[in-house]
Image (cartoon, rainbow, N blue to C red):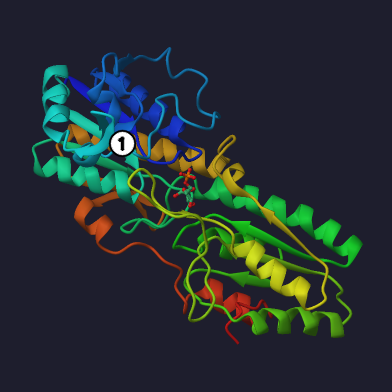
């Protein structure tokens, strides 16, 4: 193997730069091969100057940096690229153009750092002849085939710190504080931050909630003398029999954007007579320096992805299982998304400690 490429697709996650750095160092120092960065996800293949050489100098100092030195794009599906033609927007399949660009560049392997959408595209590209290797990235921790994605730990720490800060002000003012957290269809950030940050109520997409049950928990606390309550609410949480709350519906250009369930819950509680404030943590969960764990995991993933490329293990994704880095087929990784196990010890522990999920 002489030449490999690397790209970062979808929403960014803390640790992307750590993966890039590890891949570049391993490619150059262990295998003596060249490595190129593809800019702005798959888009880099489709524009002039979108593929740049990466050397040791380019990755020096990036280990603690959030974001990605390669840029990311979450609307860059080459199989359905939106373009303007004659004043209107149409969808075009640019995958053949991408494959041509990859062949022209002489890349013999492509490391794709992404979440489910980006990795699904990688698998489709493999079926058209592109030698891809996946690296599981997302703060949501919702990719199958691995125990954890990089980026999750940093988001969890940010969310937990936010809960700690809300605690002190909630207690001072005898208020209910609602913290809306990211995670789409998976409740891992809210569940883990809720437990780590001492939440009284955790609402996650996997457990539809009843408003009265949430209120019941707040009232029970007041009866016991705890005049404040903290709620960790996943953006994808939904009332029993109801739907997720979106801040913007989807159209041809954008996927629907989740957001607003925190306010929905907060307004209900306030209407029942309890002073409530709502905080939406939003993209703060995606930014900033990765935690030591995410750097450690990202570094191991990046190096392992290059080793996998050297072995010709294409259409596979590096993964963590029982503390060991291994790899699985992309198909296996994408078959079943990771969701909170309702019978797992985290949920059992939380319930046992009196944390309410709004379902009873
Ligand atoms: O998948 C990662 C994630 O941060 C989700 O938790 C969130 O719903 C979404 O991306 C936000 O995407 P965007 O950056 O497009 O607003």
In this view of the protein, which residue sits in the foreground, 333 or 121?
Answer: 121
* Residue 253 location (% of width, % of height): 35, 43
Q: Is residue 200 above or below residue 25?
A: below
User: Relative to 289, is 43 on the left or the right?
Assistant: left
Q: Is residue 183 above or below residue 125?
A: below
Which class describes the residues within 10 Å of circle 1: few (<14), some (14-19), or many (20+)?
some
Q: Which residue position holds label 1?
A: 76
Query: Does the beta carbon at disc 1 come under 8 Å from ligand 1?
Result: no
State the residue at coordinates (46%, 38%): 12
In this view of the protein, which residue sits in the foreground, 197 or 240?
Answer: 240
* Residue 267 location (% of width, % of height): 71, 68
Task: Point out the image quarter for the C terminus.
Answer: bottom right
* Residue 173 location (% of width, % of height): 90, 62
State the residue at coordinates (9%, 40%): 128
User: Residue 132's image quarter?
Assistant: top left
Q: Secondary structure at mark 1?
A: loop
């Amino acid at each position: 193997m002489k030449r490999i490429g690397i790209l970062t697709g979808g929403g960014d996650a803390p640790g992307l730069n750590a993966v890039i750095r590890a891949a570049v160092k391993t490619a150059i120092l262990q295998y003596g091969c060249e490595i190129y960065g593809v800019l702005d996800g798959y888009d880099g293949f489709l524009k002039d100057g979108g593929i740049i050489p990466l050397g040791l100098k380019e990755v020096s100092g990036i280990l603690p940096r959030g974001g990605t030195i390669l840029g990311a794009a979450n609307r860059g599906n080459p199989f359905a690229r939106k373009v303007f033609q004659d004043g209107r927007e149409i969808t075009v399949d640019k995958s053949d153009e991408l494959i041509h660009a990859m062949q022209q560049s002489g890349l013999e392997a492509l490391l794709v750092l992404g979440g489910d959408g980006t990795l699904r595209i990688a698998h489709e590209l493999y079926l058209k002849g592109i030698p891809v290797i996946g690296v599981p990235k997302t703060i949501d921790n919702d990719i199958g085939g691995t125990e954890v994605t990089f980026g999750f730990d940093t988001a969890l720490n940010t969310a937990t710190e936010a809960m700690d800060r809300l605690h002190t002000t909630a207690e001072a003012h005898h208020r209910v504080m609602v913290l809306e957290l990211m995670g789409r269809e998976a409740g891992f950030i809210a569940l883990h931050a809720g437990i780590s940050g001492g939440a009284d109520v955790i609402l996650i997409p996997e457990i539809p909630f009843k408003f009265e049950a949430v209120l019941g928990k707040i009232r029970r606390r007041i009866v016991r003398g705890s005049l404040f309550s903290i709620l960790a609410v996943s953006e994808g949480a939904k009332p029993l029999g109801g739907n997720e709350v979106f801040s913007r519906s989807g159209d041809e250009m954008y996927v629907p954007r989740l957001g607003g369930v925190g306010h929905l819950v907060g307004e209900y509680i306030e209407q029942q007579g309890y002073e409530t404030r709502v905080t939406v943590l939003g993209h703060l969960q995606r930014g900033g320096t990765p935690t030591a764990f995410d750097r450690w995991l990202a570094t191991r993933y990046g190096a392992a992805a290059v080793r996998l490329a050297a072995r010709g293990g294409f259409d596979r994704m590096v993964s963590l299982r029982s503390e060991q880095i291994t790899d699985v087929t992309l198909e296996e990784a994408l078959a079943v998304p990771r969701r909170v196990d309702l019978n797992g010890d985290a949920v059992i522990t939380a319930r046992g400690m009196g944390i309410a999920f709004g379902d009873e």
